[in-house]
Amino acid sequence: MVAWQNVRLLPGEHSKGPQMQIQNRQTFWNIDSVSECLSAFWKVELVQSRPGALSLDFCHASVGECVVYECRTNVELVASGARSEHYVTISPITGHCAASRYRGQEIKPGQLLLMEPRGEVFQQLAAGHRQLAVSIPIHLFRKVAAAEFIPAERVDAFLAWRNMVPNHRKYQRLCSYLSGLLSGKGPLPERPDADVYLTETILDVLFDDETQETHVATHQNHRRIVWESLDLIHAHPHRAPSILELCGTVGVSRRALFYAFGELLGLSPKVYIKKFRLGEARRVIINNRKERCIQRVARELGFIHEGQFSIDYSSAFGESPSQTRQRFLGLHQGVPEVAG
């Protein structure tokens, strides 16, 4: 049985007894709404890195305690933050997301990306990015892995970020299976342990004898540089820190700072700061759309020249600040901001 309804995904809110697949499709035009919807799985700062009006499609299907989902975005985005401690997430990489990067590494078609609980998120999403993923509760992953695949004492050591090249036949079958769960056209197991069955299916690919790990560089120091820089940038949206200030706070050279940002976020520190602050301005304009607030927002966020602010804003989002205000005012009054 498939039930179509709007649901809020939260850790610990799971079905009891027979498990049904709850499918939901949503389109977002506002980064805040996207972040709220995905908050069960990650807590990230999304920054739009190329101009254009955002349109992000999100589809998910709940299978007991597991959740299968797919995200599509029409504009380039940069995500930084951390994953939930409650889930292990596995993503089969297809040609639809091959132009994107995760933790500074190119993700290639035919790979499986395993993302550990509480793991860092540094992801660059290209325009047209479309990515499948399944999130499994950590306790369920441990239970199935220890019972059927590896000794219990090795499970936690396995739960570290890794790229894997799986058995091609099993990989193709897994992609078809997950897509079927989302479309409602594939096999939807009517069984009380459907999430266990799904977990077994995925672990069978992860632990197949033919599945091999690719080399994953840790980039530990680069990640530290970016994390500490983002802490300062995000803490002061009303004031852009200088490159000198970032270098002094983080304790690195200008060259190291720019290299770390370029590797993990695909943007220079200056460009990231500018796009982040423009995103903050957009957020405030949308939240205060009932007021004529654009000049006030520009002043409060430290944009000295209001005319240049409008030019930069239009370049970043493909519409002027006043057009954003009018568009979201119209959505609020007549059309739902999130269409399910």
Image: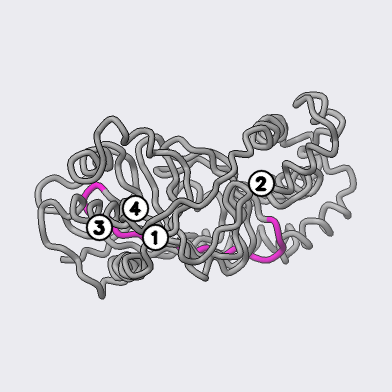
Please tell me which of labels 4 and 2 falls first in the chain.
Answer: 4
Whole-number angstrom distance, CA of label 4 to CA of label 1: 7 Å
What residue did someone put label 4 on? 206
Please tell me which of labels 2 and 1 falls first in the chain.
Answer: 1
What number is the disc on residue 166? Answer: 1
What number is the disc on residue 201? Answer: 3
Q: Are marks 4 and 1 in contact (CB under 8 Å)?
A: yes
Colour pattern = one colour
For the question of whether residue 290 can be seen, the reply is no
> Disc 4 or disc 2, which is closer to the eye?
4
Amino acid type at mark 1 = Pro
Quarter of the picture containing the N terminus is bottom left
What residue did someone put label 2 on? 264
Give the magenta part as a residue range. 49-65
Query: In the image, is residue 331 above or below residue 235?
Result: below
Amino acid type at mark 2 = Leu
For the question of whether residue 216 can be seen, the reply is yes
Quarter of the picture containing the C terminus is bottom left
Q: Please state the total of marks drawn on the protein image.
A: 4
Residue at the bottom extreme of this rendering? 185
